[in-house]
Image (spheres, rainbow, N blue to C red):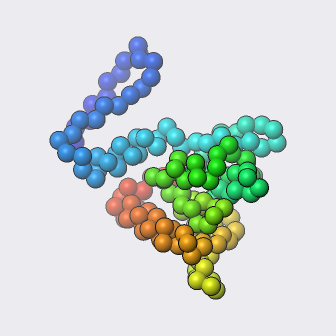
Amino acid sequence: MKVTVYKDISLTEDYIDLYCQNETNDISDLVSYINTYDDKRIIGSYDKEKHVLNKADIFYFESVDKKCFAYMKEAVYQVEFTLNELEDLLESQAFVRINKSVIINLYKVLSIKSDRNMRTLATLENSEMQVISRHYKSTFNKALKSLENKVKGGHHENHN
């Protein structure tokens, strides 16, 4: 694949045009990465201040009383999205819905174990445990497998 970068100081916005004979999986992966590159941050509110949050630092999102929160290592931020909007926004990234009120960051999962009633528990890097409900278990497993394949295939991006 040939890559050429052209610098033009008169541009008001950067843009990328991609020419290919066929849209292969590599091309699709590249386009997906480019589309999410500028979108690695999300705005959250804490103590009446707005903060720019790096998505890679978010452990999970949770909906509580019709408000949505981003849980980070040191603090919890309110975000102006619904879980459904976050699901769409984070679809191609390592976030997956695990129950009706939580979306977790797969990169923050330390372990997974079966629990009673066919539920599954995910332990996160911050030692919190989240329940993966039976309804979302298949989606979770597919997302985990997809992430595993990306890591094995060398497509793993640095998330720290």
The answer to whether 146 is drawn above or below residue 9 in the figure is: below
Residue depicted at x 44% and y 68% = 142
The answer to whether 159 is drawn above or below residue 130 in the figure is: above
Residue depicted at x 61% and y 66% = 99
Farthest-out residue, bottom: 116
- Residue 150: name its quadrant: bottom left
Q: Is residue 53 visible?
A: no
Residue 37: image location, x then y, percent: 46, 41
The answer to whether 122 is drawn above or below residue 89 in the figure is: below
Q: Is residue 58 left or right of residue 31?
A: right
Residue 77: image location, x then y, percent: 73, 48
Residue 137: image location, x then y, percent: 53, 73
Residue depicted at x 58% and y 42% = 41
Along the line of sight, the residue nearer the viewer: 80 or 3: 80
Along the line of sight, the residue nearer the viewer: 154 or 60: 60
Q: Is residue 32 left or right of residue 103?
A: left
Quadrant holding the N terminus: top left
Residue 45: image location, x then y, percent: 74, 42
Farthest-out residue, left: 21
Farthest-out residue, top: 10
- Residue 102: name its quadrant: bottom right
Q: Is residue 46 visible?
A: yes
Q: Is residue 99 left or right of residue 74?
A: left
| Number of numbered tags placed on the structure image | 0
Along the line of sight, the residue nearer the viewer: 15 or 117: 117
The answer to whether 59 is drawn above or below residue 115 in the figure is: above
